[in-house]
């Protein structure tokens, strides 16, 4: 029994080092990514903006006004109305009468968002496609130009940051924003290391040529989710992905307002992660295991009363490193106040993820809504 504390701390040391290595890896995207805030594309090649709409009447007016004011010479906006039962279609039709560059598709298929995006891509006039959700707002009129200037002959996918609006004194809102920041930290770092594994449809661009060459969502059409992350995961290469970290190219979305709806949303997103490339499943799985093991073994070591200086050194070193990385990431992604909650929200987020994993095993996630 006397050897038990030593074994626990030895295991803790191993997983702590592994976890710290991951955080050092994540830091690469803000260390090696410098962008001008004023650089705007001068290209006159057209862009097709695509947005799927399902009962978004309260959010559409702001999005429409923001999109038509984009500082870009040639673009069209394609909205896909996915069986909305509110006034979304009326709002779109009224706006389209005043703006000739707006196209509306009334989705007849019942296969959801992937079918809608596929129809929009086929209808698109231009090779450059920029996707945004209907509840999002671009940070500036330069969003379109800044995102699409990242396209080159080699770069066919552009990953942008899609954050959420801030609501004060809301624990759920803080958790949603922190989890979004945490996820962005990872997929930007992986992309910067030429190992991209996902993007978010709230702010994502790719070419029509790539979409057609990949036969769209054919490889995962039987899954309702994955129109963004699975498409990137299955079509990203070492050379064809760019990232856009200019704050003027960010988007902000309306967050879920209830714990239940957010939990269902996360179940749906995590529910397709088993379709990622094996190397990404391994890399992401090891990171989660290193997080879970760190907290579990730290609690176990403290419980058995381990008295060596090694334990507090490990705990303090790891927490300071994590805090430093999250602070830098939050500054880069304009989420400065989130870093204050890191030491509380990270373990809480790990617990929620475990609950989601278990729920997805027991009950199949539902479709998007």
Image: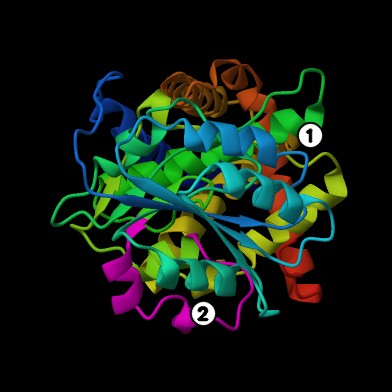
The residue singled out by tag 1 in the image is: 172
Q: What SS does tag 2 mark?
A: helix
Q: Residue at x 52, y 49 (%)?
A: 290
| Residue range highlighted in magenta | 206-228
Q: How far across and down, in percent of the image, does residue 122 sit?
A: 42, 73
In the displayed structure, would residue 30 be above or below residue 365?
Answer: above
Q: What SS does tag 1 mark?
A: helix
Let me know if residue 298 is in the magenta part: no
Q: Please report whichever mark, 2 or 1, sits nearer to the chain's N-terminal start.
A: 1
Residue in front for this viewpoint, 11 or 243: 243
Q: Residue at x 41, y 23 (%)?
A: 332
Can residue 2 be seen at all in this image of the molecule? no
- What is the crowding at mark 2: few (fewer than 14 residues within 10 Å), some, or many (at least 20)? some
The residue singled out by tag 2 in the image is: 220
Q: Residue at x 68, y 41 (%)?
A: 60
Residue in front for this viewpoint, 90 or 349: 90
In the displayed structure, would residue 280 be above or below residue 44?
Answer: below
- What is the crowding at mark 1: few (fewer than 14 residues within 10 Å), some, or many (at least 20)? some
In the displayed structure, would residue 212 be above or below residue 26?
Answer: below
């Amino acid at each position: 029994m006397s050897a038990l504390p030593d074994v626990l701390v030895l295991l803790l040391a191993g997983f702590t080092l592994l976890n710290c290595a991951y955080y050092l890896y994540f830091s690469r995207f803000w260390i090696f990514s410098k962008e001008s805030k004023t650089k705007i594309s001068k290209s006159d090649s057209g862009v097709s903006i695509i947005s799927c709409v399902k009962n978004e009447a309260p959010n559409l007016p702001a999005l429409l006004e923001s999109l038509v004011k984009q500082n870009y010479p040639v673009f069209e906006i394609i909205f896909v109305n996915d069986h909305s039962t509110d006034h979304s279609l009326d709002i779109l039709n009224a706006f389209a009468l005043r703006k000739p560059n707006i196209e509306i598709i009334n989705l007849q298929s019942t296969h959801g968002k992937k079918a809608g995006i596929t129809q929009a891509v086929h209808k698109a006039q231009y090779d450059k496609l920029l996707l945004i959700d209907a509840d999002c707002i671009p940070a500036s009129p330069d969003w379109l130009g800044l995102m699409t200037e990242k396209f080159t002959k080699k770069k066919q996918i552009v990953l942008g940051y899609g954050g959420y609006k801030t609501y004060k004194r809301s624990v759920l809102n803080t958790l949603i924003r922190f989890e979004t920041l945490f996820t962005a930290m990872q997929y930007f770092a992986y992309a910067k290391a030429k190992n991209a594994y996902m993007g978010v449809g709230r702010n994502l661009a790719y070419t029509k040529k790539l979409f057609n060459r990949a036969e769209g969502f054919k490889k995962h059409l039987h899954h309702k989710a994955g129109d963004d992350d699975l498409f990137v995961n299955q079509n990203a290469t070492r050379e064809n992905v760019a990232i856009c970290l200019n704050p003027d190219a960010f988007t902000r979305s309306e967050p879920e307002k209830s714990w239940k709806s957010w939990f269902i949303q996360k179940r749906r997103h995590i529910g397709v992660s088993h379709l990622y490339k094996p190397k990404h499943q391994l890399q992401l799985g090891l990171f989660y295991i290193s997080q879970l093991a760190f907290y579990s073994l730290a609690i176990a070591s403290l419980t058995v009363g381990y008295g060596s200086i090694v334990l507090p050194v490990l705990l303090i070193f790891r927490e300071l490193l994590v805090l430093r990385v999250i602070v830098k990431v939050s500054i880069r992604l304009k989420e400065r106040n989130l870093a204050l909650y890191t030491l509380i929200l990270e373990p809480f987020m790990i617990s929620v993820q475990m609950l989601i994993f278990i729920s997805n095993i027991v009950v199949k996630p539902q479709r998007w809504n």
